[in-house]
Amino acid sequence: MASTRRVTDPEVKTKRWYATGRRKSASARVYLSEGSGNITINGRDIDEYLRRPILRTMLEGPFGTLDKAGAFDVTAIVSGGGLTGQAGAIRHGIARALLAWDADTRALLKSAGFLTRDARVKERKKYGQRGARARFQFSKR
């Protein structure tokens, strides 16, 4: 079952929704709360952490699908992988947290492909070969 739950923080006095997202070897713990659209990743602002604009727009995909841009604050703790994998993990976590917020959004998020875990990972190098699929150069003569 998906790792989503509703978290109530006694210090903050607001409702928060939690979910875990994964992509390649990156894993993200995402906390969603009602707010003004601030996104914090590992204690840093999104513009400071993800410098490529395409990664920022990738994170905002689930909010755009539901027309909720700027309605939630996102706090993410992400580890493993590179920046693209981490952005994909955060996006997956945001979509799952939105599902914990309102279960009726499942059809929209599912049809947009945000709830599907992207299982593509790098294929391992095989022995006797130069890479995963590439062979050593063959010379007939």
Image (cartoon, rainbow, N blue to C red):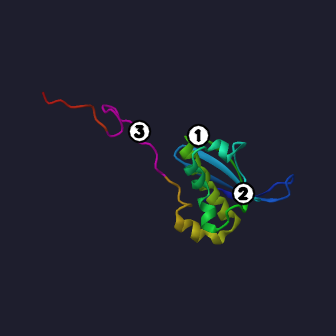
Residue 16 in which image quadrant: bottom right
Say whether disc 2 or disc 1 marks the residue closer to the N-terminus: 2
When the figure is inspected, residue 92 is found, relative to residue 131, above or below; the finding is below
**Tag 2's secondary structure?**
loop
Main SS, magenta region, reads loop
Q: Nearer the viewer, mark 2 or mark 1?
A: 2
Residue type beneath disc 3: Arg
- Residue 24 in percent (x, y) is at 51, 46
Q: Which mark is residue 6?
A: none
123 up-or-down from 67: above or below? above
- Residue drawn at point x = 60 percent, y = 43 percent: 51
The amino acid sitting under disc 2 is Gly
Relative to 114, is 24 above or below? above
Residue 63 appears at what percent x and percent y? 64, 62
User: On the image, numbered disc 2 is attached to which residue?
Assistant: 37
* Horizontal side, residue 106 vs residue 70: left or right: left
Using the numbered discs, state the Cα–Cα distance from disc 2 to disc 1 in whole angstroms. Answer: 25 Å
